[in-house]
Structures are given as structure tokens and as C-alpha cells.
Image: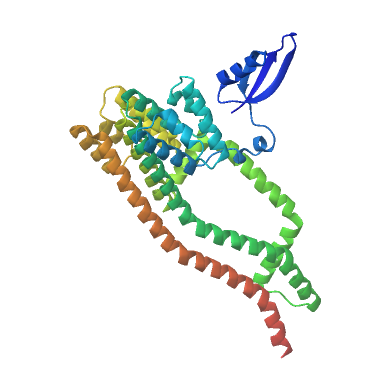
Amino acid sequence: MKLVYRVTTRDGKIMKGVIEAKGINEAAAYLRTKNLLPISITLKENTGIANFFNFLNKSNEADLVFFTRQIASMLTSGLTLVQSLSILKDQVQNPFMAETVSNILSDIEEGKTFSFAITKYPNIFTSIYVSLIQAAETSGLLDKVLFRLAENLEKQQKLKSTIKGALLYPAIVITGMIIVMVIMMIFVIPQLSVLYDNLNIPLPLPTKIVVGISKFTIVFWPLVFALIVLFIFLYKRWYATESGKLIVDDLTLKTPVFGKIIRQSILTEFTRTLGLLIGSGTLIVESLKETSSSAGNILYRSAIEGVSRRVEKGVGIADAMSVSPLFPPIVVQMVKIGEQTGKVDESLTKLSEYFEREVDQSVKTLTTAMEPFIMVILGIGVAFLIISIITPIYNLTTAIK
């Protein structure tokens, strides 16, 4: 890791510089061999273009899955955590992740715990990840918890990929339609409009509409662009407020078709994560609190927090969930069975698998139904443009005959 140091020389002068070392202790020892007295040694912050463009300096979900899976495999094979991290830092392809692994290794070599070392990187390791590692260190089952955590992360990644894949096709088609419309309105329609004016052709209503939109786009496009940017800015500020989140998240859940998929996705993540936390030995109340903090929808976050408060007062998990309509009856019943058998984590895992299958089926149905719908909309739009362009010319040729 790169460290920034301030030292004093024998003459009492203060010097600054940057040194490459495994940790602060190693850097201090090296500086003392050079007859320099360290005043302060800190981790070098990122500067330059990588700091300006934050996305150039981060890891992705695949890196985290690879990190978790590899550490679990090496621990199971009998290697120590230090040995595992030493091997892994040379295997990681992402430079930022490799540096992160190196820094974690340095902290552990200095006597710090694994869970403490990863808390420095909240953008990579979530609070749930840290909680699971803390529970694993306490129980001495770090390799098993890491294996379950890797499987959980892989399933999360698969779920997101499924949903993104379903939305990719309509997104490409809609983007293409918008690009074609803009090109037509800015370059093609104005030329035809001049031709119609020169020929003094009476324009039908569809053509007047298209020409009017074209003229408006050419003259007022800076205003339209500014209004779009302003709308996005105001929307983000409004959505940052609690009232804005409540309204948007509520409408999102009530959206036809998409709302059902979003609810199923949230329940998949909720049941899987809660089952993983409880199975690792984390207290139920703490597990609920951790799960609520990671919920993307504020309505579900509030509902999970409500369940946590009721459980803390001595109410069963299933009974606490039954108060909120956001938890369907199947969740309540399965959790109640888990409480009666003492296997709540297994019941939650089965629920997550059930909801995951439901999401897959809903996405497949949506994709199948969306393709002909998009083609119909695209056909209507193209037909309207063709009629608008061709009709005046056709009327002219008819009149000449």
C-alpha cells in the first residue's frame, strides 16, 4: 500500500514523502533505518482522474464473489487466513480490489481481526457482510459462513442479471426509436417541409403534426434539454426526502406487472439474507435490523423495522410479520413452521428459492408478452411517420393525373 509520511531528520528538519509498504509498522521501521523519526504515517488518498471519476476506482460484484469464494476454498483446504489473502492478492485482476486485499492482509498481520479490516471498505463489504464475518469469527466457522455468503452473493448477482437481461431488449428498442425520431425531426422533416412549401401542397393533419413537432424541436431543443435536466435534478432532490421515497416506492410496488416482480425480488433478497444471518448465529433482532438497512424500498424497510421492534418485545417473528400486508401469507406460514421446528433459517432459505423461481417465471412471461407489444408500438409509430410523409406527395401525384 502507498503511505504518506512526515518525518524529522537529525538536523530537526521536517520532510514529507510517499512510501510503499505492507503496513504502517513496516514503513516506520524502514524510515528509522534511514535515521528518520516518523511523525505521522497515513494511507495515501487517491488523487487525479481516478479520484474525479470514482467509477475508475472501485470493484464490482464479481470481484466480491471471487474474493469470498476463493478465501472460503483456501480456508477449507487448511490454509490460514493470512496465507489465503497472500495468495489471493496476486490472483485478483482488478487493481483496486488487489490493493484492498493487500491492505486487509496488512491489518490482519498487525493483529487486527478480519471483520475489523474489511469495515474500512464499506463500498465493497456491506454491513451485512461484516456482521456475518463477525458472527463467523465468534463461532469459529469462518470457512462455512464464507461459503454460504459466496452462494448468497452469486444468487443475488444472478437475480439482478435476470432482471437486467429482461429489460435490455425493450431498452435497446426504445433508445433506437428515440434516436431515429430525433434524426427524422432534425434532418429529414425540415427538408420535406421546404419541399411541401415550394410545391404549395395542402398538408393533411398528420403531416402538420409532424412538421410542427419538427419545428418545435429545432427551435426549442435547448429549452427542452434544460427542462429535462431540471426535472431530473428536482426529482432526485425530491426523492432524497422521506415523503418523496414513500410516494415513489409505493407507486413502484403498485405498478402493473413490474410491481409484482419488484415485490418478489425484494422478498427474495429479504428471506435469503435474513436466513443467512440467522443461520450464522446472529441474534434475530440484530438480523432483522441489518436486513432492514439493506432493503432498497422504504416501505419494506419500515415494515422490517416494525417486525424487529415487535420481536424485541417478545412477539414471534411470524406473528410480527402478519401485522404488515407487505409480507404475503406464505412468508408468515413458512416462518411460523420454522419457529415451531427450530429451523427458521432453513424455512427462510426455502422461501428465497421459491420467490427466486417466481421472479424467473414472471420475467420470462414479461419478456414474452413485451416483444409483440413493442413491435406493435414500433409499427404504429413507423406507419404514422410514413403516412405523414407520403400522403402529401400522393395527393400531389393524384392531382396531376
Q: Position of residue 152 (x, y in %)?
A: 37, 41
> Taking 347 as reference, is 187 left or right?
right
Determine the image quadrant of residue 141: top left
Residue at image location 62% in from the left, 44% down from the top: 232
Is residue 306 visible in the rendered structure shown here?
Answer: no
Q: Which is more toward the observer, 112 or 175?
A: 112
Q: Position of residue 316 (x, y in %)?
A: 25, 29
Q: How many numbered marks does the figure carry?
A: 0
Q: Quadrant of the N terminus?
A: top right
Residue at image location 57% in from the left, 37% down from the top: 96
Determine the image quadrant of residue 98: top right
Q: Is residue 268 above or below residue 310?
A: below
Q: Which is more toward the observer, 182 or 250?
A: 182
Determine the image quadrant of residue 362: bottom left
> Taking 363 as reference, is 353 left or right?
left
The extreme bottom residue here reads 401
Q: Which is more toward the observer, 143 or 197?
A: 143
Q: Position of residue 358 (x, y in %)?
A: 34, 51
Q: Position of residue 175 (x, y in %)?
A: 59, 59
Q: Quadrant of the C terminus?
A: bottom right
The extreme front residue here reads 33
The extreme right residue here reads 198
Q: Which is more toward the observer, 96 or 177?
A: 96
The colour mode here is: rainbow
Residue at image location 65% in from the left, 35% down from the top: 51
Is residue 303 visible in the rendered structure shown here?
Answer: yes
> Taking 158 as reference, is 56 left or right?
right
Residue at image location 31% in from the left, 31% down from the top: 278
Q: Is residue 155 above or below residue 306?
A: below
Q: Is residue 285 above or below residue 63?
A: above
